[in-house]
Image (spheres, rainbow, N blue to C red):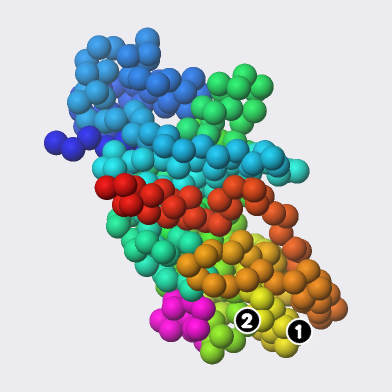
Amino acid sequence: MEKKSIFGLTIDQLTGWMLEHGQKKFRAQQVWEWLYQKRVKSFAEMTNVNKDCLALLEEHFHIHTLKQVVKQESKDGTVKFLFQLKDGNLIETVLMRQHYGLSVCVTTQVGCNIGCSFCASGLLRKNRDLESGEIVEQIMYVQKHFDEAGKGERVSHVVVMGIGEPFDNFENVVNFLKIINAPKGLAIGARHITVSTSGLAPKIYAFADLDLQVNLAISLHAPNNELRSRIMKINRAYPLEKLMPAIDYYLEKTNRRITFEYILLKDVNDHKEEALQLAKLLQDKRHLAYVNLIPYNPVNEHGYQRSEKESIMTFYDTLKKNGINCVVRQEHGTDIDAACGQLRSKQIKKANRTA
């Protein structure tokens, strides 16, 4: 029997598991508190849980499966972790110190099949989806990083924007969201959590129907089909004619603001013309649309360059003059491997060279 991470169970699932294995219902709450409030490192530390229950837990679950391989710390306080999973695969997790709190960016897949032409995550094809517990453990590991520092800090915000397409691992990601949002667990507020998708239209409808109160971000990066299909292969399956109605459904269903991520690539999508097209595309939903303009972190393998500062500000000013709320994203970790997937890709190439 292959053991799973115990962090992959919601409180309801853990309660059901306890009952199925002949344990009292209250045992689930005890174990939950040990995991998320006392943050134990082994089942043996759960001193008020009986031996039979502990033996069952040891038999069926791992309590920690991530192994830190590399930790990079930036001058601005950003910390990038490279973790090894139990099967030897590598993933990245990033801690960012924001003015509003401590935010963690999690990975949801080993590699990525979306194939955006500018992204380091897609340099290595998808190997597999992460289990819910493997995503939760990323948060737990960063929280352990805080606990060991002894300053009383806690993870307050989560962005699901790491390696992989979250909506391509929909069920595990939704389970993860429910676990970290649970009141007597990590209790990270739904409105402090953001999930990003490159535009899997059917899953946007499904996500809207869940009514989780979790924020949604769309990796848009181009305002027309010709350009978007050129830099994002996903647009060939879900062009703007399919993506925008899904977004409209989400907005109508939830009445929640949606963020549009837009990486600025020099002489590719950063002209005033594209800014005007983007403003027109979002005009009818501008009361709930928010554009996040992202200066590009160059990836050697792709050849794209960062837009000039003047081009970024012209793009920003054009959107603002056309009534579109926008911001130029604050950069984090520019003195380390800043681009998503960059550290993992370098580590794997290094291992291959020495093999």
Q: Where is residue 26? Give x, y as percent.
A: 37, 22
Check residue 258 for magenta coloring: no
| Highlighted range, magenta | 229-241
Residue sitting farthest toward the left: 1
Q: Where is residue 332? Give x, y as percent.
A: 66, 50
Task: Looking at the picture, tell me which residue is in the foreground, 212 or 180.
Answer: 180
State the residue position of label 2: 268
Query: Can you say whether 199 is above or below 72 in the image?
Result: below
Query: Can you say whether 59 is above or below 124 in the image?
Result: above
Q: Where is residue 286? Give x, y as percent.
A: 73, 75
Q: Residue at x 70, y 72 (%)?
A: 307
SS of the residue under disc 2: loop
Label 1: few (<14), some (14–19) or many (≥20) C-alpha neighbours in 10 Å: some
Q: Which amino acid does label 2 sit on?
A: Val
Check residue 232 for magenta coloring: yes
Q: Which residue is drawn at 46% across and 47% down?
A: 92
> Quick check: can you spot residue 29?
no
SS of the residue under disc 1: helix
User: Tag on residue 183?
Assistant: none
Label 2: few (<14), some (14–19) or many (≥20) C-alpha neighbours in 10 Å: some
Q: Where is residue 38? Give x, y as percent.
A: 49, 20
Q: Which amino acid does label 1 sit on?
A: Lys
> Quick check: can you spot residue 335?
yes
Distance between mark 2 and mark 1 Cα atoms = 11 Å
Eye-nearest disc, 2 or 1: 2
State the residue position of label 1: 272
Specify whether 317 is left or right of 353. Answer: right
